[in-house]
Amino acid sequence: MQPTGQWRPATATEDALLRAVADDDRDRYFGVLAGVNLLVLVRPVDDGAVADPDWATRVDDGRVSLVAFTSRAAMAVHGSTRPHVILDLAQLAGLWPDPDWGLMVNPGLPIASRLPGWLVARLGSGEPPDLGPEPAPAPVAGPDFRPANLTEQALVDAVREDDSLQFLKIVAGATVLVAVEPATPPDAAPGDHDFAWRIVDHGEPSVLVFTSAEALAERLGPGATAIRAPMSDVLHNWPPGPVSLVVNAGSPIAVRLPADRVAILAARVFDVADLCLPSPAPAAPVLLQKVLAHTQVPLFLDDGHGRVGGVFHHVDDVAALSIPELAALPGFAPLDWITDPEEGSIHVIRWPAFCPQLYRPVAGPEPLSLVGFGVLLPHRAQLLRIWPDGYESLVGEYDARERCWQPERGPATDPYRGDLRDGYVATWDGEDYLAWPAADGVHLGAALAAGPDMDRPGHPVKLDELDALRYRRTTGVWRGERFVVIGAHGDWLRLELDRDEPGLGAELGLEEFDHRVFQTWAARADVDVTEELVGESFSFFD
């Protein structure tokens, strides 16, 4: 089957699947599926929550199949609004309901496939699909080195191209083998009390991780004890102290990160589920969600409010949770804060997290929480209503150029925007432009420098066509604390506290604008103001 139609891959995983379909490479296709999380549809129970999975199925030619998607975007194209659980093939195989059933992946899309139950079990166990003769991998990075999987082949390509950023993106998105002490239980995970890190002397105290069992055995021997875990989990549960990270020690695709750079990687790569396989183009930004206080919905829809602050979550981490389960998350707003008192529904905003440096991970249990303050929403962010039974309805999309919500809402004048120059800035063909990033690409506005901009494309630009995408914002220090400047009116500035510390807002006498979000007006003369660009390129290599 050849890829056709208007559908476009939303993630690096879908891009890899599409390329495998175009090359008619079944082994590569199923190898991609073996390493990713899937959104598997389930039926809601009466209270809207998902308990033990009651699988949603479809029947084609008498064959029963579970239904799964590789992204929420793929689910939306299919038109599905069902609840779902997020599982990889190993987890799904452990819950498999009937050996005669199959798995339908991305139905209706050019990357669709149906896997029989036995193949789900085989791929979930880490075994190759064994669908036919497997060509021997070409020697790379030296005559004695052969990549064991797609991840290692991608690392080889990054080494050949001297692309350190792509190398680390691939590592950060991979599932790795972490060397641990022999006493570690086989079902332990990073962050568990019985997960015993194996700290070795590699010039300095270091943790060793490997991208394949072959690389592990080559360095530590066939009997070495290791735990398989997503690299994101490893980073967010990193052992205390000055501990370095060594990837594929002794291999041509090895890299060492000092402890301070491990911390930077953990802080910036807060969600890499869509980076577990390589793509020549930047991976699609992860989708974030904020639940609104029910009293603030008119502020967004009627007043054109387009900023978010406080606690956010990755949509895929919370999509299967009921409304009471959302409210029960650590640090979350109380149930009566977010629910409509008459309907019991909630409103959420979802948007792609361009410039992920705007969001900081919060230490705590899963699912991962993020905080950010005073962030302008990107173009076409969505405001949705979620009913107690899990049904979602679209209320409106944010027009970042007009700063209003569509449809049915006319342009709203922001009386406090003042002389702020905040928003996204894209560098294209060496020039900086005002930008409105969206799911369909980055829309470019006027050039920031004086002069004609007649060469500016009139259509949205793909991320990989840009030199950079950054976020320009104004910050200020007032009473010794850092704030994001979110508005201006005459000689006064509207400030939002850029810190999530219990009790600090009340101590400073600030208004609690939202749950864990504190704002105030301050005289412009009393604020030490700075304009900054967030999202500069960075490298983790010396």
Image: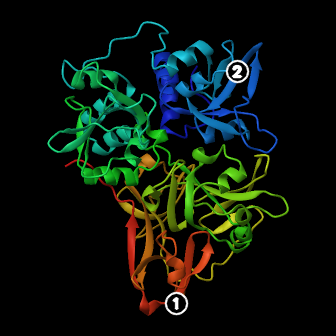
Q: Nearer the viewer, residue 468 or 198?
A: 198
When the figure is inspected, residue 151 is found, relative to residue 256, above or below; the finding is above
Q: Quadrant of the N terminus?
A: top right
Label 2 is placed on what type of residue? Answer: Ser
Q: Could you say where residue 262 lies in the image, as x and y percent from the top left?
A: 30, 49
Give the residue at mark 2.
Answer: 65
Above or below residue 303? Residue 124 is: above
Residue at numbered disc 1: 492
Q: Position of residue 41 (x, y in %)?
A: 69, 33
> At 79% across and 50% down in the image, what residue appears?
388
SS class of the residue under badge 2? strand
Label 1 element class: strand
Which mark sits nearer the N-terminus, 2 or 1? 2
Q: Provide residue 54's location: percent of width, then percent of height.
A: 74, 30
The residues bearing labels 2 and 1 have C-alpha atoms spaced at a distance of 61 Å
Question: On the image, which quarter does residue 300 sit in?
Answer: bottom right
